[in-house]
Image (cartoon, rainbow, N blue to C red):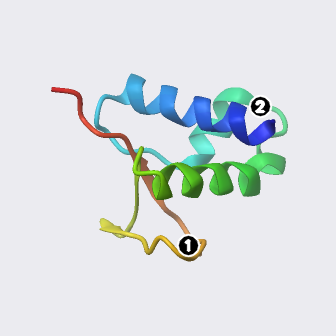
Amino acid sequence: MQSDILSLAILEMCRMRRGSNFCPSEVVRWMYPQDWRHFMEDVRISMMDLYRQGKIVVTQGGIPVGLEEMPKGPVRIQGFSET
């Protein structure tokens, strides 16, 4: 259930950002301003689920991360630009 809410929040932030990338922490800071750190693992799981489904792109250092592993360190999320 939590991952469904976070997935929707990630997709909504992609829509609001219109092609600009953002950090997964921005999603949980937006949703849970006081306790956002507690949700970092959950948002990263949701992020990778959406990435594997082809709904978003996850990059590290500007390069798409591998689909099979959870990336370590800072990553960026980007939605697909609507044309």
Residue 13 in the image: state x and y as whole percent. Answer: 48, 30
Residue 45 in the image: state x and y as whole percent. Answer: 67, 56
- Residue neighbourhood size for the residue with mark 1, other residues' Cα within 10 Å, grouped as few (<14), some (14–19), many (≥20): some
Q: CA distance from mark 1 to mark 2?
A: 23 Å
How many discs appear? Answer: 2
Q: Residue furthest front?
A: 53
Pointer 1 residue: 71
Residue 61 in the image: state x and y as whole percent. Answer: 35, 70
Q: Residue at x 29, y 39 (%)?
A: 80
Residue 52 in the image: state x and y as whole percent. Answer: 49, 58
Pointer 2 residue: 32
SS under mark 2: loop
Q: Is residue 51 left or right of residue 7?
A: left
Please, what is the three-letter code of the amino acid marked with disc 1? Pro
Q: Measured along the vertical axis of the image, is residue 70 above or below residue 42?
A: below
Q: Residue at x 64, y 29 (%)?
A: 30
